[in-house]
Every structure is written in structure tokens, then in C-alpha cells.
Amino acid sequence: MNVKFPEQSDSQKGSCSGLIEYLEKEDNKQEAKGLEKEYFFSHSQNAVPGTEVQQLIDKNIRKLGKEDYKYYTFVISPSKEELKHIGNDPDKVKDYTRELMEAYAKNFNKGLEGKDLVYFGKVEHSRQDRQTKQDKGEGNMHVHIIVSRRDQQQWYKLSPYNNAKEGYETSNKIKSSGFNRNAFREASEQVFDDKFKYERDITESFQYQNTMKNGNFEDQVQLLQRNKENEKTQQIQQERKKAPEIKRGKGLSL
């Protein structure tokens, strides 16, 4: 599972109309193939027109200044193995996204749930190669998320770019502030695995990939050892499955 937060753009300080227009670009391709148009979806609806998305995001900006970001966007990209596991089903991807947005809301540590957010998703079925400008083919389904900086009640400013700060105390409880993007990436895997009973290889995990890229030597060695142990366990399990079953007799003959 890949969750990508792109660099923020000045366009996010104004209307989201340009982003809506960009995200609807694939509709013409879908219709040309005789497929149904992919509408935006929300936490509770499956077919939300782009005009309604723009209206709801653009008006949810109470007490946001001219130079404040009004909305954020990120991309959720299941791997080909994950998509194959769920039969490349866009409805399952939408249901998964809704559960993941529960984790997004919880990450801010303000007692929020997914239903408290103003967000919309848009499923895209293909990706375009940057060099050839051609579609990459199947196995590239992903979801674009556009989420308001404000919650529905417009009580909180919610930015996934405000890095989490641990350990401030309030009412004798230790809380954190901001947003932990790495924890959210790990949650994206946990939600998928739990929901669809997916057995994730350690090398597929964000923890493994992040540690091998950015971790210290000791942590990298520890993960490599865990990976070898997992490979050995999987090999034993496969050998057991291949072994012929021994049928037990009903009794012994003398």
C-alpha cells in the first residue's frame, strides 16, 4: 500500500475547481470504453457530482485567511498484489478508503471520526506513463482524496502536514498534536489486512521499506533477520501442504 502526500500548492489556498476538473479527466476514457462514469464518493454517498464536491469544499472555510490552505489532497495506491486479492473491485476499494479515513480522523487526536470530515474520493483505474504518455494497463487502480482543512462543524483546522508533537499534558493526560503521516501509512496496511484477511509479507510493509531506506544499521539488520525467519516459516508451511496426507486406519489388524 502506498499513501502519497504531494507537495502543497498555492492553488490549495483558493477554490478546488481546478483539482475537480483534473480528477474528472479519466471519465472520458471510461465512457469511450463503454464503462460507467466514476463519480466522486464521500463517507456516506457513492455518486457525488463534481459540482457538489467543489461547493462543499469551497464553502467549508470559516476563519481561514487568504493565505491559508483550504484543502489537502493525497493518493492511496494499493499494490497489484492487494488489488488482485480483492478482485480489482472498485467498490471494495471505496469501502476500504472509508475505513482508512476513520484512521485519518483519529490521527489528529481530537476525538474525530470519519463522518466528521469533509472529504471526497475519486477512483482512477489507470495511470499514465510520464515518458510515453500511455496508460500502464491493469493493476493500477488508485484513489485521489480531497479533504477540507476544516471539519464539518468548522471547529478545527486539520492539516496532515503539521508534524505530530508528542508529550504535552492536559487534564493529567499525555496527548499528542499534529498528524503522524508514517503512523497513517502503517494504518493503511493494517486496515486493509484486517478488512480483507490479507497476509502481508514483511517486505511489503511500510515499516520494512522505510527502515531499509532511512533506518539505522542495527534496525536494518534486525528486519533482515525477521524476513529470513518468515521465509523459513513459509517454506515449512508450503512443504507441509505438499506432503501426502496419511490416512489413519480404523484399527490394527494382527
Image: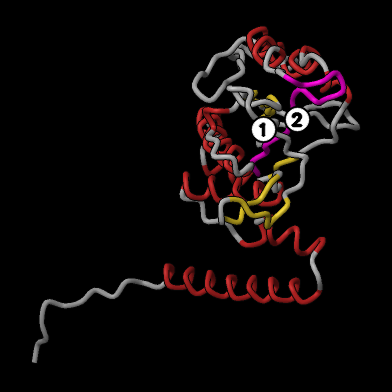
Q: Which residue is mark 2?
A: 127
Residue name at image x 70 percent, y 72 percent: 224
The location of residue 160, given as percent across then percent down, is: 73, 38
Q: Residues within 10 Å of mark 2 (few under 14, many from 20)?
A: some
Circle 2 — which element? loop
Q: CA distance from mark 2 to mark 1?
A: 9 Å
Could you say which is closer to the camera, residue 9 or residue 194? 9
Q: Nearer the viewer, residue 118 or 134?
A: 118
**Residue 130, x across and y down, in percent:** 88, 32
Determine which of the numbered discs, if any, sits on residue 201 in the image: none
Relative height, residue 117 to residue 32 (above, below): below
Count of numbered circles on the image = 2
Query: Image point 59% across, 48% down: which residue?
Result: 187
- Asked if the residue at tag 1 contacts the one at tag 2, i.e. Cβ–Cβ closer than 8 Å, the answer is yes
Magenta stretch holds residue 70: yes
- Which residues make up the magenta segment? 63-79
Residue type at mark 1 is: His
Dot 1 falls on a residue whose secondary structure is strand
Q: Amino acid at mark 2?
A: Arg
Whether residue 250 is visible: yes
Q: Quadrant of the C terminus?
A: bottom left
| Rendered residue at 68%/28% (across/down) | 145
Q: Earlier in the sequence, mark 2 or mark 1?
A: 2
